[in-house]
């Protein structure tokens, strides 16, 4: 909410000194909304000092994140001195298992998963996640933006979406397995629904956070609804929507693994299910580590893409946040 308010205030400062009627072509009221949006983006994309007085410029490496990862591995190693390998395998054994099962895991052939390994299963899971995130993001964003501007649509969709979002995936999964079988479709729809709920909320709040002065000014100057949507609504909501997609992507990996765990023929979740029945803790940890690493890589790529696509957006930062 603070980011939306800050964004709106900066746009209001940009709008005050601009003579919009003179900036538009005479006799062409449809260009008014575009002129307003261009003024918004000119102010938002103005050069921002990279150095704050009394602070050091942030480097491109998250040293605190690396320190936390090292600390986690250290705790893991220390716990292996207390717990037996059958309950908690040491990190180096898990790394060896990843290398052994990465291309082809012979042990899985005894459980009906012949000619497969962690790589093939991870590709299957990642494909499902990306497709589900794309479908859910498109549907949720569109529904959220429409609901933010049409009160009747909002009154109808809000109870449905909010109720669906509170239902655990463990409750919905059995119904989807019965309706759509154990193939890819059931897992795709499960993940897409939860992603759609997240994006519905993000898109709706992003549209609500826009200062009404810009849309009202555009309408007053003769802009059509289509021009207001394309030149004001979408550019102002893109940063928060992209942030919502990144959050949904981070959670989609776990949802997909759970969906595969409950009923699937392939994927990392299926491997975990099979190895859990054989109490193969090394194999389970190897699959989970691979899933976690892939999720971290995709989150980093998503963060980079968001910073480039929404380069004009400057998130509000706390005064207590330090630049290392």
Image: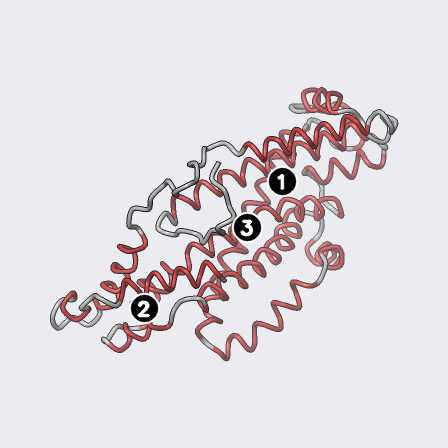
Dot label at residue 241 = none
Q: Secondary structure at mark 2?
A: helix
Point out the frontmost of discs 2 and 3: 2
Q: CA distance from mark 2 to mark 1?
A: 39 Å
Q: Residue furthest left?
A: 26
**Label 3: few (<14), some or many (≥20) within 10 Å?**
many
Q: Are marks 2 and 3 in contact (CB under 8 Å)?
A: no
**Label 2: few (<14), some or many (≥20) within 10 Å?**
many
Q: CA distance from mark 1 to mark 3?
A: 12 Å
Q: Are marks 1 and 3 in contact (CB under 8 Å)?
A: no
Dot label at residue 228 = 2
- Which is nearer the N-term, disc 2 or disc 1? 1
Q: Secondary structure at mark 1?
A: helix
Point out the frontmost of discs 2 and 1: 2
Residue that mark 3 sits on = 133
| Residue 51, above or below 18 | above
Residue 261 in the image: x percent, y percent?
74, 44
Q: Residue furthest front?
A: 54
């Amino acid at each position: 909410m603070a980011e939306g308010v800050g964004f709106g205030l900066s746009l209001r400062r940009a709008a005050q000194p601009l003579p919009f009627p003179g900036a538009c072509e005479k006799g062409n009221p449809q260009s008014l909304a575009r002129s307003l949006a261009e003024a918004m983006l000119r102010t938002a994309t103005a050069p921002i000092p990279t150095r704050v007085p009394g602070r050091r410029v942030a480097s491109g490496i998250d040293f605190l994140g690396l320190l936390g990862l090292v600390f986690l591995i250290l705790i893991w190693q220390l716990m292996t001195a207390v717990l037996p390998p059958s309950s908690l395998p040491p990190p180096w054994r898990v790394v060896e298992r990843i290398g052994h099962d990465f291309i082809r895991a012979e042990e899985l052939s005894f459980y009906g998963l012949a000619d497969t390994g962690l790589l093939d299963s991870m590709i299957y899971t990642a494909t499902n996640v990306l497709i589900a995130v794309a479908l859910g993001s498109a549907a949720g964003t569109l529904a959220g933006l429409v609901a933010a501007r049409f009160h009747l649509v909002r009154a109808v969709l809000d109870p449905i979406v909010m109720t669906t979002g509170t239902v655990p995936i463990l409750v919905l999964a059995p119904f989807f397995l019965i309706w759509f079988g154990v193939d890819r479709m059931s897992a795709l729809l499960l993940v897409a629904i939860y992603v759609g709920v997240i994006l519905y909320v993000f898109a709706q709040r992003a549209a609500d956070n826009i200062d009404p002065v810009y849309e009202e000014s555009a309408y007053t100057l003769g802009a059509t609804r289509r021009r207001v949507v394309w030149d004001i609504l979408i550019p102002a909501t893109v940063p928060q929507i992209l942030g919502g997609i990144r959050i949904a992507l981070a959670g989609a990996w776990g949802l997909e693994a759970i969906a595969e765990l409950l009923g699937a023929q392939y994927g990392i979740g299926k491997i975990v299910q099979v190895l859990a029945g054989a109490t193969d803790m090394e194999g389970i940890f190897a699959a989970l580590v691979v899933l976690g690493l892939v999720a971290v890589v995709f989150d980093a790529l998503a963060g980079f893409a968001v910073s480039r696509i929404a380069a004009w957006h400057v998130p509000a930062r706390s005064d207590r946040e330090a630049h290392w």
